[in-house]
Amino acid sequence: VSFSASNNQITGDLPEGLANCQGLTTLRLRSNKMSGNIPPVLTELKKLSVLDLSHQRSDDDGSGGFSGPLPSFSSASSISRLDLSGNSISGTIPEDFMALVSQTAPPNYEFVDLSSNRLSGVVPKVIATIPNVYLKDNRFTEIHLDVCDASVAYPTTTSFGCDAILCPPGSYNSLGRQPSFDDPCQPCGISSGAQY
């Protein structure tokens, strides 16, 4: 079962009644005006493969969108695409984030996009085991060293270390990281209090 209602003017919270949708495989609500916390019931939908709740924040002032903590999705075994970018999700990435995906590596796995939120703290070790996690435009203060040496999940770390995950404080790249020798992180002139 798939449900898509992207690019509308839908407002309000996600309903807890989604817990009754155990056959749901795809939920796309990109580019609406939804808010509130992401309900933990979404992590209990065993067949959910694609979840796109991205770009709920206002283009005018960057406010709104989904907020509160990032659910761990630790029991979500079928997720292949998780896009929560362009919201106001805050706090840290849970240590057990996407735990089953990191252990089983589903064959159809694509990416996790947490870009443009308000996540903070340390990028945890578990990210080293989940390929294609996008983290730019957040408020991280540190990257766990195992992530910077995760050559299986992130082959470019072999050449660029932590810069392959996120540009260091005081630098930038349009991708938020260094993808190649020809496209490095560039100084941006901000040093005091800068974050990843």
Image (cartoon, rainbow, N blue to C red):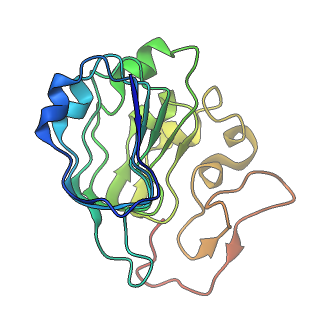
Out of 117 and 41, give the one closest to the viewer.
41
71 on left or right of 101: left
Up-down relation of residue 33 to residue 78 (above or below): below
Q: Residue furthest toward the right?
A: 182
Q: Residue furthest toward the left?
A: 16
190 on left or right of 68: right
Up-down relation of residue 46 to residue 143 (above or below): above
Q: Position of residue 88 (x, y in %)?
A: 31, 64
Q: Position of residue 106 (x, y in %)?
A: 51, 15
Up-down relation of residue 170 to residue 15 (above or below): below
Out of 132 and 33, give the one closest to the viewer.
33
Question: Residue at position x 38%, y 77% from top?
Answer: 62
113 on left or right of 149: left
Up-down relation of residue 194 to residue 140 (above or below): below
41 on left or right of 138: left
Q: Position of residue 140 (x, y in %)?
A: 40, 61
Q: Position of residue 97 (x, y in %)?
A: 33, 34
Question: Residue at position x 68%, y 67% from top?
Answer: 173
Question: Residue at position x 38%, y 84% from top?
Answer: 61
Q: How many marks?
A: 0
For the N terminus, the image quarter is: top left
